[in-house]
Amino acid sequence: MSDGAEWQIIRAFTAKRLEPALAYIVQHGAVVRSENIKTKHMDQGISAKLQKLGLIDFQRAILPQAIYTSGGRSERIAPVGTSVTCHKCAQVGERSGTTLTCPQHGDVNADGNAAIWMLRGGVASGC
């Protein structure tokens, strides 16, 4: 099997797995916020995999269109500081792998912390 054919199968599988999530989001989300992914700042290998899986297209085109046609709103949030700024106290901590260590609140999951900032509209929003 060629590399291109293999990626077509993987992309189709990924799209099938995203269908229930998209249906749920469209049904329940009046406003959907997601990270404004900038692939030019990413590791080239990760960027290429995201492109091949169709996740970039999903996030930039498919999701916003589905939200818009259902009467909702889609917002892309700048990810700057979301995984290193504590969502509880807004202090900048130290990130090591998937862990953010806040000076006041200790260790938290950095990705979960970033998701909370996304929900609030990003670190720059001051929420």
Image: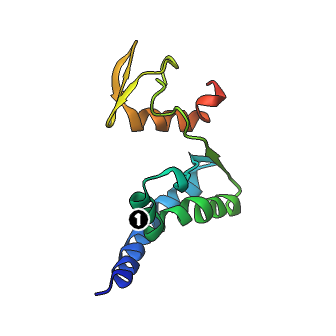
Q: Is residue 62 above or below residue 121?
A: below
* Image spot of residue 100 (x, y percent): 37, 28
* Image spot of residue 113 (x, y percent): 44, 32
User: In the current view of this chain or complex, which residue is farthest to the left?
Assistant: 1
User: In the current view of this chain or complex, which residue is farthest to the top?
Assistant: 104
Q: Which residue is mark 1?
A: 49
* Image spot of residue 90 (x, y percent): 52, 20
Amino acid tagged 1: Lys
Q: Nearer the viewer, residue 65 or 48?
A: 48
- Determine which quarter of the picture holds residue 53: bottom left
Residue 49 appears left or right of 75? left
Residue 96 appears left or right of 93? left
Who's the residue at 39% across and 82% down the image? 4
- Classify mark 1: residues with Cα within 10 Å, few (<14), some (14-19) or many (20+): some
Q: Classify mark 1: helix, strand or loop.
A: helix
Who's the residue at 55% across and 59% down the image? 59
